[in-house]
Each structure stands twice: as C-alpha cells, then as structure tokens.
Image: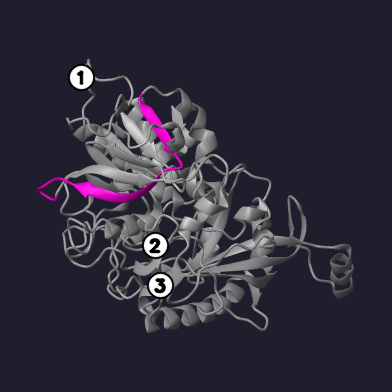
Amino acid sequence: MITDILEIDEQTVLRGQVIVLGSGIAGAEVATHLARHGRQVILVESGRERFDPAIQALNDVVFLGKRHRELKPDAYYHRYLPPELRGVSRVRQFGGTSNVWTGKWKYLQPSDFEGRSWVANSGWPIDFGDLLPHYRSAAKDYGFGDLEAEAVRPEIMAMRARIAAGGLKMSSFYWEDTPTRTAKRFGEEMRRSQNLRVVLGATATELRLDESGQRVTAVRCRSLEGRELTVEGDTVVLATGAFEAARLLLASDRQIPGGIGNEYDLVGRFYSDHPKHHTGTLRPGPLVRDYARELQYGPKPRFCICFALDDETQQAHQLLEHVLYLKPLYETRTDWLKRLLTGRPACRDNNGAVETYRVKFVVEQVPHKGSRVKLGTERDALGQRQLEVNWCFTDHDRRSMQKTLQLLTERSKAVGLGSFEFGDEPPSLENMTDAAHQMGTTRMADRPGAGVVDTDCRVFGTDNLYVASSAVFPTGPSYSPTFTILALARRLGQHLLQTTSKPAADYSPAPTEVPANAPSR
C-alpha cells in the first residue's frame, strides 16, 4: 500500500521487519524483492508522487570545491525531461532519481574491480563474478538486451579487433526505449502489496540505536508540514544515494559522536563523480564509415558503443579510465552539397548520412580522502544541517586526463575512427560538468578502517544497517553506475532473505501502525 505521512496519525510508530529509505532504483528493487518473498517492509520516501520544489530544496548543498550542474530548464541535453527537472541530478520524488534517468545500462568490466598499483585506493573487495549472476538476472527480469551476447556478435568482434591493433578498446551498453522509472514500474505492485507499505512525504532525519550502539532500532522522520513519524524495524537499508546516505549517518550523532559508522572518519570521504565534456566533434574516418550502423543512437532500444585506451596503455602511462561516446549528427542539405563538391565519401547508418559525431568525453577520478561531503552549519527547512561538498581533484587526475586526450586523439586518427575537434574550449576539469554519478561516500572495504561498509554492504560497527547505492563504490571506472547499483541491490536483497525469516503466522499481514506510547516488541 502507498500512503502519505499526512494520512498517518500524529506521533505514530510504524513497525515492520525491514525499513528501506528511498524509492529509486536500489530502494524499489530491495523493497519489492523482500515483500514478494513474504517479508514485512516499510519504504520511506521524502518526496511525493507529484514533484514538489519545496521538498526538492531539501537537496540543496553548499559547494566548497567544484560546483555541480544545477537546474537549467533550457538545457538541450535534457529535453526529454519536464523543465523543472532539467539539469537536476538528485530528485526527491516517488521514484527518486530514476525520474531523470536516461536508461543506459552498462556492466562494470572485470578489470574495474581490480586494484591498480598506479591508482591510489583502487580496487573492490568483491570481484566481477560476485555481481555477474545479479547483472544477468536483472537484465532478464527488467527486459534488457543481452550484453554478453552483444559482445561476441561478429560485427562487434571485428570492430574490436581493428581498434585493438591501435591500442584502443571498446565496450557496449544497452539503451532502453523508455527509461526505467521505478514509480511506474513498481507503483501498482506497491499499491497492491500486502507486505509492503510505502510512506511518502517523510524525510528520514535520524537513525536511533539501542543501548549497545550496534543496532538501529528506529528511523525518525519528519515532513515539511511539521508531521513526525517513527519507523521501527529489524533491518534498515539506506537507498538514498551517496549524498543522503552519508548525511544521515553523520547527522545521527546524538548517541555516537561523529555519526554512525564513522569511527575512522571515513563517512563522506572518497567522494567521486564522472566529470564530462560534451561539446567536442569527430569527423568520421574510414573505420567509422565501415561500422556506422554500430554507432547509431536510434531507434531505441539498442546497444551502443564507447571507446577507451586499452588496459596495457593505461598501465604503461599510469592513466585512469576515461571514455569517449560518439553521437551521430546527420547531414543537412547544405552539408550534403559541401560533401558532393569536395568529393568526401559518405558516412551512412540506418538513419541517414552522418556529417559529424558529437563527442562526450567522460573522466574517472582518483578516489582520495580530501574529496568529500560533510555536515555544514547551514540548515534546511526541516532544521537539518546541510551538506558541504568539496569535490576536488589531484595532480594525477589532471595528468591522466591530458595524456589520455593526447593518446586518444592520435590513436583514433591512426585506426580510422576520425579526427577530433574541441574548438576554443578543450576538455579540462574546470570546464567539465558532473555526470550526476555521485559515488564513494560510504565505500566498500574488507575491513574497518579502510571503508564504511563490508562486502555485504553492511555498515561496519552495526548489526543491521546497510547501504544500497553507488555510495559503496570504492572506484567507478566505467561510465553509468546504474546497472551496478541495481546488481548490488539485488545481491543485498538475496542476502537479507537469508538473514531474515518470514514472520510467524500470527504476525500482522502488513507493517503495523501502533500508538507512539506502545511498548516495543
């Protein structure tokens, strides 16, 4: 069932087995998976079904370093969104940030999980094999194309071999026709579910612990209208994204100074995103002309390709993984006449003759402690401390980006991809925007002192608190973290099924609502 906090009596306590905070890709996956298997779940969402600017303003942060993109109703690259969401990277609305998701699904590659000796703090404590079954099952259940089959398609293998000879590599992603919006995909199931209760308009403001300081016993929530709600459960999952997961852990500091999970001062640290530059162009060369049909962006759904320097080059020059995406721009009649006059050969895909390709250049950054989010002194409309975001970079980031641009330009021309033009504003970390891929603020590690969550995404020092988002990414080499977020959420859902049991026969058939002064179970 779906309710609003305003429909619940003042000072009510809700009780369930599992509390999930956030209704985006991760939260919806975990909550519905557990409810289908008989667990009693309460999902809490700050937003409502209709977008509310006042609730959205709770996302406001104070930037200490490089700024992130902001609301820009006229942004050309977000025309598929309503004006109030163009340029927005985090959304407080039923469905979370899936409401602005573009629908591009990409595996991390096996090498992305490995530590690189030349990249400080790199490597995951799990490997590709730990997530592969969850990638596969999610692709099947969500109706995605088969990325593994695409990788061995003859045309792709032939193209890969030609660019590999020039020190480049490529990988594919699946682009949905209609991007997954969790409110649409799961909304009706949530309304009908007897095991799942969704509460909208309720912002989690504090996690409360038992006397041992190791178990979260309750989540305290408030609304902009002043309504308060307490939600109790046996297990709590933070599926609120990298900013809000860190913020809630840090803000829950009345019982543990410094916040929950922050014994080693790591909550909020190692923050990263994918800086991107998207105004370059590529004049197609012979290889692109041969494989133009593999590079087209429509019609969707379809597989698309991105390019990078090969692993050997990255290691030899101590580079990070930076990726190129090519979007075809088709000939106008004037372009057609110019091509005929100059005798330039046509580059054609199934949609027409391509004049140039728009180049999107996407950058990995070194995970380092100084790039971080922390609680500031300014307060939001609920009286909560806003985040201060110091998104910053290292000398390694800058050297890696410049060297990669040089080598990509040289090698792309040599293998026949074509010639790049960046005009008067070549890519730099100063003029690039974020990609709305917030990562790393509660990074996964194999031991306390190296990260915030363990390999099951459980917060170190707690028995029942988990994080389901890209906040747990130790590194994010590949562009588009959403498929990995989904795979991790699916993996966590299966873990929680093994560590929780179906309620007894006399347990209420839905998460229960009790007076605030009732004794705890």
Instruction: State which tag comes first along the sequence, 2 or 1.
Output: 2
Boundaries of the magenta span: 195-213
The residue indicated by pointer 1 is 504
The residue indicated by pointer 2 is 476
Q: Is residue 170 above or below residue 1?
A: below
The kind of residue tagged 2 is Gly
Would you say residue 336 sits in the magenta stretch?
A: no
Q: In front: 5, or 41?
A: 5
Q: Evaluate if marks 2 and 1 touch, with contact meaning CB atoms under 8 Å apart.
A: no
What crowding class fits label 2: few (fewer than 14 Cα within 10 Å), some (14-19), or many (20 or more)?
A: many
From this viewpoint, which residue is outermost toward the left? 212
Instruction: State which tag comes first along the sequence, 1 or 3.
Output: 3
Give the prevailing secondary structure in the magenta stretch.
strand
Quadrant in the picture for the N terminus: top left
The residue indicated by pointer 3 is 320
Report the Cα–Cα distance between label 2 and label 3: 10 Å
Report the Cα–Cα distance between label 1 and label 3: 52 Å
Q: In front: 96, or 341?
A: 96
